[in-house]
Amino acid sequence: MKTIFLILAFSLTTFAQIKATTEDGKKVILNADKSWDYVAPVDTNAPAILYVYRLKETGVYNKARELRIDGKEILELRQGDFVGIKIAPGKHVVRSNKEDSEIELNASGGETYFIKLIVGYGGFNQTFILSEVPKATAVFDIKKTNFIDEKQLKSSDVNLVKIKPE
């Protein structure tokens, strides 16, 4: 039994990566093979990217939903659509319609964020819920969506990201 535990513990540590900082402040990762990789610094002044998407669903409310950022109507998001938007670093409030849920996002420059518009059910009513999702989930989901039709834009000063995340 002790042998199995030691082998398992050794196996887990051989595949782990250890993050560290060098004396001169550079971020590095120690790989399992004991090699070092430098981590590129993130430009904190660069815009963040926000992806918002809505999967295609059958038998649910099909009308497009407003997407608002900081109270400003940006676009109407239809089923099966996604949008990528460059946003300034800092705090933002993302909302779908006036009465739906909202997410407060504290965006860091150079980072990417993912929000999914989900339909929730309560009796005979449908509620639309915004949910921040992990990158792996969003990348998988967004493969099944299409970039918005730019006619859906309600604001002309939106800096779009037209490629799907990887």
Image (tube, grey):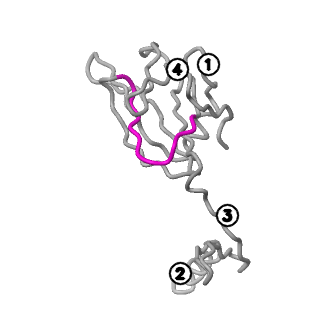
User: Where residue 54 sits in the image (x, y, percent)?
Assistant: 51, 27
Q: Are marks 1 and 4 in contact (CB under 8 Å)?
A: no
Mark 4 or mark 3, whichever is nearer to me: 3
Q: Name the residue under label 3.
A: 40
* Residue 96 magenta-highlighted: yes
* Cα gap from disc 3 to disc 2, whole angstroms: 37 Å
User: Where residue 38 sits in the image (x, y, percent)?
Assistant: 69, 70
* Cα gap from disc 4 to disc 3, whole angstroms: 37 Å
Which of the numbered marks, if any, corresponds to residue 5?
2
* Residue 70 magenta-highlighted: no
Residue drawn at point x = 62 percent, y = 18 percent: 149
Of residues 72 and 144, the one drawn nearer to the viewer in this rendering: 72
Amino acid type at image mark 3: Ala
User: Where residue 152 sits in the image (x, y, percent)?
Assistant: 55, 16
Amino acid type at image mark 2: Phe
Amino acid type at image mark 4: Gln
Q: Name the residue under label 1.
A: 150
Under circle 3, the secondary element is loop
